[in-house]
Image: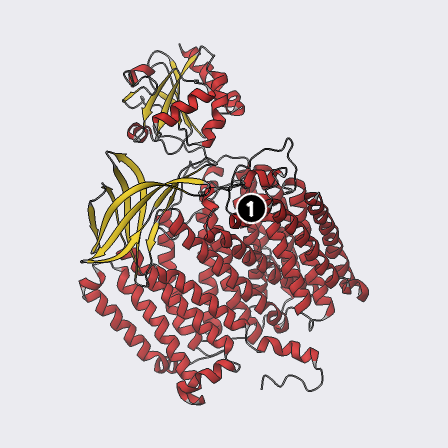
Amino acid sequence: MSKSFRYLIPLILFAALAALLVFGLGNDPRKVPSPLIGKPAPTFSLPELTDPGRSVTDADLKGKISLVNVWASWCSSCRAEHQALMALSDIPDFQIVGLNWKDDATDASQVLRVTGNPYDMIAYDPDNTVGIDWGVYGAPETFVVDRNGIIRYKQIGPIDSKVWEKTLQPLVAKLKAEG
Amino acid sequence: MIPELGNFALILALMLALVQAAFPLAGSLSGNRPWMRMGRPLAYGQLTFIAVAFVALTQAFLTSDFSVLYVAQNSNSLLPEIYKFSAVWGGHEGSLLLWVLFLAGWGAAVAALSRDLPLPVIARVLSVQGMIATGFLLFMLLTSNPFERLFPVPAEGRDLNPLLQDPGLAVHPPMLYMGYVGFSVAFAFAIAALIGGRLDAAWARWSRPWTTVAWVFLTIGIALGSWWAYYELGWGGWWFWDPVENASLMPWLIGTALLHSLAVTEKRGAFKSWTVLLAIFAFSLSLLGTFLVRSGVLTSVHAFATDPERGLFVLLFLCVVIGGSLALYAWRAPEVSEGGRFDLLSRESSLLANNLLFSAFTVLVLFGTLAPLIYEAFNWGKISVGFPWFNKMFLALSPFLALLLGIGPAARWKHDEPLRLLRLLWLALALSVVVLAATAARPALSEGHPWVPVGLALAAWVLLSHLTIVRDRLKNKGGWRALTADLRGNGRSFYGMITAHAGVAVFIVGVTMVSNFQLEEDVRMSPGSSYELAGYRFELIGVEKSKGPNYNADRGHFKVYRGERQIADLHPEKRSYLGGGMPMTEAAIDAGLLRDIYVSLGEPVGGGDWALRLYYKPYVRWIWLGAVLMAIGGLLAVSDPRYRTARARAAAPVGGATARA
């Protein structure tokens, strides 16, 4: 009995591994939480991309729900995301603030001219000075900031209709209800 | 039209695979010889049809036929011709096609080269191969058909992932796949033996050369991948413990254990059920590797193609193949006899220790790779088991492996005397201790890194003990002069082992030196300025725009001086591919046997200045050189006439095998 059980051990171990992998399939490993969630947005002051005379600062994030969207012209997922952002830009509940990251102003403006501008304002951060404070490690990323300037959520990867309907829309509704 | 032909050929190959999975096996169980004989022609037929499909896909790439979805996603009319060819396996669908092509190739090779095998054995082996092929062809046709059409036809393709537009990566996946798939042969032999209930020395001898060849391919594939990551990713590292790298390392580790365990089973009839288990695991880990890469279960820098739906299919397939074979093992292995006995000090026990160390390391790598998943499953939060953890595990186990490596090949089968071993190896041991003491005592040599003396002493120990073993072997044959004769005679597998083990020594030197003495510096430089690192002066001449066939680049120019003498011109690049995506760095490397100088171009930081990374990498080439020696050792071992005598016997039944004398 004990001897033949010994030969069953590999099978049992594999069954455990398979269960783990089944569990893993239903999960998204990209959900690394940001340590900034629940904390005030880091202070910053950057020139506005389309209007370099103006500046965008953390004060602009107060009093309104904001989606802070990290993007760049060289990032192909951002281009895919752009359409979704254009569709969201008409919703009055929140503002969309762009963080144009590690990019070139001419290239970035060119993209906006061709595909439209979904942003209420765009902070221009070519040297990743603000991106580092925000813990940006790739584009696109989107932070949801509430009316008090507290970061409430970080979306890694592009926003599409699924992400919007399942995650962001309920969150924005909740923040709105918080008053 | 041609893509439809390819698709049709794949369907036909699937039909043949189904027949191949069923009939030869059924025949072997019922004693129906015509059914058993169907195996060989079916294996050839399968190779033919899959090759037709592969040629069809290649043709679609070479003619830039963007009506094929896969081509449109992975090619571009501007892509250089050579990459149009390698783009065939640049994405998920095509790499699967390459997988099944190799699987069919190995199957046909087994069919052609195993004339001396008893018919029921070859029938079962080919049936098992047919089952694996069925699974993969179904996977391809149901979830990832490379011949899917796209309408309307786009004017231009999306381009091959720029990371893959590189000669190293054109050959890395094929090598790796040859290794992965090659283990299917050892697996098929093991399953066939379990079904037939005959696990004996003959079975081990049949599996051994196949396993070795697969292992050689995997060794080269992993080394190429490491070399590619080193020069292409621009981080200067040669191994990242990335899930995908681990996925290829695990079958290699188990495969290495299997090679050694097979030797014991062949020579001494021991470890039989253990060897079978290793054969099952080597291939299972190859499949698991495919799963980890394809499913997106674990994120990784390599995540080129991830898709949960495909993951589910692979997982089901995995459960059937691995679960099924382990169930078969649980059922049949208890009947296997234990085999020859051996003492505590014997070659068997040192090979057993080798097996345990390799298996333990595999378990650790598997755990480390899956740790994020395990933690999440039990709600322990998110973790990422990183580089330092894996390195610690590697450092905890590998010194024991290296120590053992000097003793194992010197020990006798069954029983050995401690005194005899000591008399044989005392000089090698003494010299290694001298190396240890000398490097530890002289701060100039070790610079206070405790691992430097240990690493160098272990490398010396491996090398010197093996020289001693060679000398001991040649002592009665006329000394070192007999070496070439011995090499031409029946000593090939012995010298194969020596060469592969010497490769380990070379590898240890490379890892020790580069890990402890490498220098890297992030600098900001303006054109005309210089920076000094490790006695080399890097002068930035300038950065200018340049244009490639399908990319625009910033191309830097460096002159590197040692003292007053200029020793290299380096041109690191930062490329933006027209197809879009992240800019790619192309590091510039001045390679040498004793050191690499490595420059990677960062971002422009304003005022004409550039951010740059400079590296000095001593002995980094030895890491890959070690792998090359291991592979050469493997090839030398399979070229041993011993594996051909059986075939010669079959061809000339009268007279028998005299070649072995």
Viewer-closest of A16 and B358: B358
Relative to B241, residue B209 above or below: below
Image coords of residue B334 (percent x, y): 63, 63
- In the displayed structure, does residue A82 sit left or right of residue B136? left
Seen at 23% across and 49% down, the residue is B539
Viewer-closest of B386 and A97: A97
Query: The N terminus of chain B appears in which quarter of the rendering?
Result: top right
Graded by Cα atoms within 10 Å as few (under 14), some (14 to 19) or many (20 or more), the crowding at tag 1 reads: many
Circle count? 1
Residue topped by disc 1 = B291
Which picture quadrant has residue B206? Answer: bottom right
Residue B198 visible: no
Seen at 40% across and 64% down, the residue is B626
Seen at 49% across and 51% down, the residue is B247
Which picture quadrant has residue B498? Answer: bottom left
Amino acid type, mark 1: Phe
Q: Secondary structure at mark 1?
A: helix
Viewer-closest of A3 and B177: B177
Relative to B341, residue B186 above or below: above
Image coords of residue B228 (percent x, y): 42, 52
Label 1: chain letter: B
Residue B128 visible: yes
Image coords of residue A32 (percent x, y): 42, 33
Which picture quadrant has residue B616? Answer: bottom left
